[in-house]
Image (cartoon, rainbow, N blue to C red):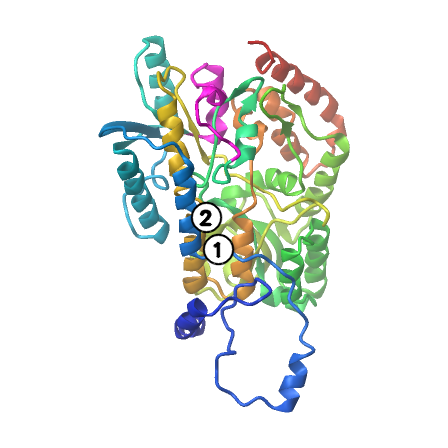
Amino acid sequence: MKLRILLAALLALLLAASLCSCGFIVLNDMSGQETEESAEETEMEKHVPEITKFTKYRTREDSKAISDAYLNELPGRDYEGAVFFLTTADSHYIAPDETESVVSRLAIQRNAEIEDRYNITILFEVESPDDIREKLAQNIAADSFYSDLIMIPLYRTGEFQYGDLLLNMRTAPFFDITQPYFNSESSDMTSGGYRTYGIAGDATIEPTRFAALYFNRASLTGAGVDVEALYNRTAAGQWTWDELLEIRSAVETVGSAGMTFSAADELAARLPDLVFKSMGNLFVTSEARKVPMVGFTLRNGQSVLNVLSQLYNNPTVQVRSEQDTAQLFASGETAFRVDYLETMPTLTNAAVDWGVLPLPKAVAAQESYKTLADNNTLIFSIPKNHTNPEIPVIILSALNAASSGYFGDAYVEYNMMNVVRDNGTINMIDLILKTASFDFALAFGNAYPEIADATFRLIRDCAATNDLSAYYSERRAEANRVMRENFDLTY
């Protein structure tokens, strides 16, 4: 590809020169060429508009130094060659068997570094969530050891909490959820009453599993959209669902794409959840020392439904799991597509001239972009009967500290050199990786149906019918009752 040839030729320049003063990552800066500028060209340069400022991702060397500093802040320990058992529902990200991807290689190196630093051997055991739950329950009943640390899917948290299998992580020494290598929202959304049941961080939140909005540059340009200006507005925090719907309507009017919007089959069922969260809402408000409660009103819930109903009831939109629409986007027949970032490599040689944006906000004034974590995102938890919780807390902290920024930067750099097609997409990927968001309803709704029925299932059920008011009050009252009974403030 021409882009790859250009990137290879300019790699030395990219690494040696500082990236542009406005903070954007630049692939095709030709300023290093020895060309004679005419007076006309010089005059034109004076009138080039300044690109909206955006803080670029740190270089891999910088972020590695920062992660090392985080590690050095943790308590120093020598566990004298002890074996540390970590049981996980999936090891491909925390302890990969292969080194095909750069992130996999970094994970293997990180694990070896932690083993050396603490003089331990980490044994990663892979068990299904059902087996982890069953065996942990048996060992707790027998007052015997099961594992130092477990990693379970976010949506199974409620089942382990209901079975009283997890340690209250807030009672463990050296557990500091304020550290930047943890996602503090993940601990708030796995907390209820006086207890915190788990936490996610840089060692568990996979870059490839972020949902994102892919767009077809040709169809947007055909509808009169300035794509570079769109990138700049997005970096400035001004990208909203209203603007997306306006662009979709313009694409439909001019007929620049047969399908104006689609959702990947794998996440079609989750689209209402993603839209709800991207608009800055909480299904459930929760944090330590508070009783969880339904966190959205009929008014802001209706705002979400107003967006969803325009997608579910349009003939040029496909957001249900009814047909495979991936090829339609790859061939340039779709304007927008919601899919995971892991899809990017499949588009490297596709006919469509594509780019990526984060899911929009409700309004520009919203604090930040939000991307709801995949339901299968793993969280760290500690078995209830662990006799020395200091050990698992220090090791889970070290695993996340040693991944902080480093993995995300490597992922962005790889895609910059091998996958994406324009400068703006690189900055958007970097932006997307900072938007991970969690919700109590996703963590506990599987175990408590009343919570699910009043939150994400309610929004899903009303996505096409737009009749939220008919169900909201009754379901909210029932969910709040269940949460008061199961997550109260009594010891």
Q: Which residues are magenta?
A: 152-178
Label for residue 58? 1
The span from disc 1 to disc 2 (Cα, nearest Å) is 8 Å
Q: Is residue 470 above or below residue 280?
A: above
| Image quadrant assignment for residue 174 | top left
| Three-letter amino acid code of the residue under disc 2 | Gly
Name, please, the residue furthest toward the left: 81
Q: Nearer the viewer, residue 41 or 77?
A: 77
| Image quadrant assignment for residue 86 | top left
Other-residue count near label 1 (Cα within 10 Å), few / some / many at <14 / 14–19 / ≥20:
some
Residue 91 horizontal/vertical position (percent): 34, 37
Q: Is residue 350 above or below residue 466?
A: below
Q: Is residue 322 magenta?
A: no
Residue 112 horizontal/vertical position (percent): 28, 41
Q: Is residue 173 magenta?
A: yes
Rendered-image quadrant of the N terminus: bottom left
**Residue that mark 2 sits on:** 405
- Asked if the residues shown at circle 1 and circle 2 are in contact, with their CB atoms under 8 angstroms apart, the answer is yes
Rendered-image quadrant of the C terminus: top right
Other-residue count near label 2 (Cα within 10 Å), few / some / many at <14 / 14–19 / ≥20:
many
N-terminal label among 1 and 2: 1
Residue 268 horizontal/vertical position (percent): 55, 42
